[in-house]
Image (tube, rainbow, N blue to C red):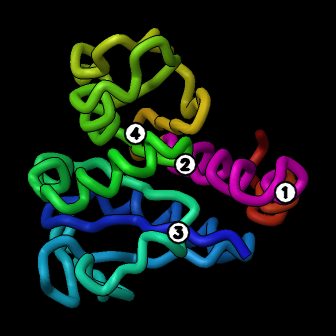
Amino acid sequence: MAKAGIFFAEGYEEIEALTVVDLCRRAGVEIQMISVTGEGSVAGSHGICVKMDALLTEVDFGQLDMLILPGGMPGTRNLEGCASLMEELDRFYAAGKWIAAICAAPSVFGHRGYLKGREAVCYPSFEGELTGATVLSEAAVADGNVITGRGMGCAIPFGLIIVEKLISRAAADALAESIVYER
């Protein structure tokens, strides 16, 4: 079974994070909601507090197939400010393992040099942060081992690409049909 970790910092975008969790769990991906705050619950940018599955210090990164960053402000900045998470992202990227980010969070990938020569998307107004990328206007895009999504309204296509890459296109298509979403 595929395993992913999605990381929560204070001020994350709730729909981006929880849509991905929901879609992954429906598809059979084992996804952990991981707090980088040291607290067992984390509040989003709209005051919705969600109970986490694990704290960052409890995670066995060797067991994960993908690392996922939701956007939101100040959540994106708070994720980028977490040095141990950034070290793990660097390891995953260098090893060719899957990394994904949506909304403002692809800016983290741009700052770390992951997007050079790749196609990517992000929330409008963050395009300048995608250093070295060819910026597209699609809902979500995968290029190599990097997946990016534009924003809250693109959370379903972003989640479906994650399912496609961790399981299969057929699984993502079946999931889309089961939730009455036209791809």
**Residue type, numbered disc 4:** Gly
- Name the residue carrying label 4: 151
- 19 relative to 52 in the view: left or right: right
Instruction: Give the crowd class for mark 2: few <14, some 14-19, many >=20 residues within 10 Å.
Output: many
Question: Mark 3, mark 1: which one is toward the viewer?
Answer: 3
Separation (CA) of disc 1 from disc 4: 22 Å
On the image, numbered disc 1 is attached to which residue?
Answer: 177
Residue carrying label 2 = 98
Q: Which of marks 3 and 1 is nearer the N terminus?
A: 3
Quadrant of the image occupied by residue 124: top left
Camera-side residue of 113 and 42: 113
The first of marks 1 and 4 along the sequence is: 4
Amino acid type for the residue under numbered disc 1 = Glu
For disc 4, the neighbor class at 10 Å (few under 14, some 14 to 19, many from 20) is: many
- State the SS at label 2: strand
Secondary structure category for the residue under label 3: loop
If you read the primary sequence from the N terminus, does the residue marked by circle 3 or circle 4 appear first?
3
Which amino acid type is shown beneath numbered disc 3? Answer: Leu
Callout 3 touching callout 4 (CB < 8 Å): no
Classify mark 1: residues with Cα within 10 Å, few (<14), some (14-19) or many (20+): few
Q: How crowded is mark 3: few (under 14 residues within 10 Å), some or many (20 or more)?
A: some
Question: For residue 64, which numbered disc appears in the image?
Answer: 3
Element carrying mark 4: loop
Placement of 182 over or under 3, stated as above or below: above
Residue range highlighted in magenta = 154-172
Disc 4 to disc 2, how far (Cα)?
19 Å
Quadrant of image for the N terminus: bottom right
Answer whether labels 1 and 4 touch (C-beta < 8 Å): no
> Does label 3 or label 2 sit earlier along the sequence?
3
Looking at the image, is mark 1 or mark 2 nearer the viewer?
A: 2
